[in-house]
Image (cartoon, helix red, strand yellow):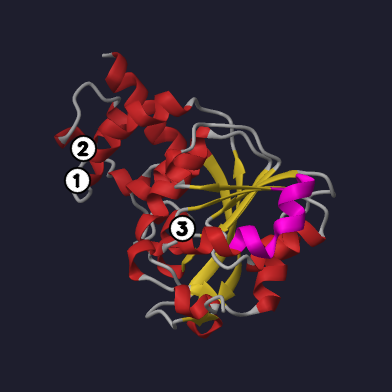
Amino acid sequence: MSPRPGELYTKKYGQVLLRNPKVARFEVEALKLPPGSRIMEIGPGPGTLTAILLEKGYNVEAIEPDHRFYEELLGKFNQSVESGALRLAKGSFLDLRGNQFDGIIGNVPYHISSEILFHLGNFQFKRAILMLQREFCNRLVSPVGSKDYSRLSVNAQLRFRIKVIAKVSRNSFSPVPEVDSSVIEIMPRGEYLEVDIRKADLVLRKLFSNRRKKLSSSLSGLPEDLCNKRVNELSPEKLMEIACKEIMG
């Protein structure tokens, strides 16, 4: 007899399994893409989202690191695999090279949220729907001047337009985690090259490590109107401009 999804849970992959079908359907609906669209699913686990994606007529490519879930998925969706509607790979999304998809979706393990989010910058896509820890999501969308505005906020907002579209109770998962989650919509901005953002981050790291100090204490040669500013008073775009000038000398 095959194990039930709950019996496949392991801390190794940071798994908390969504057990609320209404939430799963909301996530898939939030992609807002027509049938036939090419979708990447990150870590399908027992296939809750996968089943709805296939029902919607999407062409799904899913990557699952846990060999037990991978084997379960092969059996559960055997017909879809044979027809080509589902391409299933064993491995980590973080190991995938950049590719092009219409949409990307996944309920992401909390401990690799940052890595997953920023790896999206290597891909071309119209819209991504991810479920992440609520506190992390709040930091991603924090506005200039707020207490949660950080280097993470700036890096995320330079790459993407991010919106929190749902709050999800911890009781929607099994086993029940210690925190609540949120579903976010992510759309690429496309205004900066990934390589340039990564270079700028070296300067952002320096500025945010001295976030309580004036910019002039961290950087020289700034315009007079910026010398007395602090990093959390400046927009991601302005910080990108400052960082690029600093890099270029």
Q: Which residue is mark 1?
A: 209
Mark 2 and mark 1: span between their CA atoms? 5 Å
Provide the secondary structure element on which disc 2 rests. helix
Q: Which residues are magenta?
A: 73-86
Q: How many marks?
A: 3
Q: Are marks 2 and 1 in contact (CB under 8 Å)?
A: yes
Question: Residue 67, labelled with which disc?
Answer: 3
Pinpoint residue 60: horizontal percent, then vertical percent. Answer: 70, 49
> What amino acid does circle 2 point to?
Lys
Pinpoint residue 158: horizontal percent, then vertical percent. Answer: 48, 38
Provide the secondary structure element on which disc 1 rests. helix
Q: Is residue 235 visible?
A: no
Q: Are marks 2 and 3 in contact (CB under 8 Å)?
A: no
Say few, some or many: other residues with alpha carbon within 10 Å of mark 2 (under 14 / 14 to 19 / 20 or more).
few
- Of the image marks 2 and 3, the number of the one nearer the N terminus: 3
Say few, some or many: other residues with alpha carbon within 10 Å of mark 1 (under 14 / 14 to 19 / 20 or more).
some
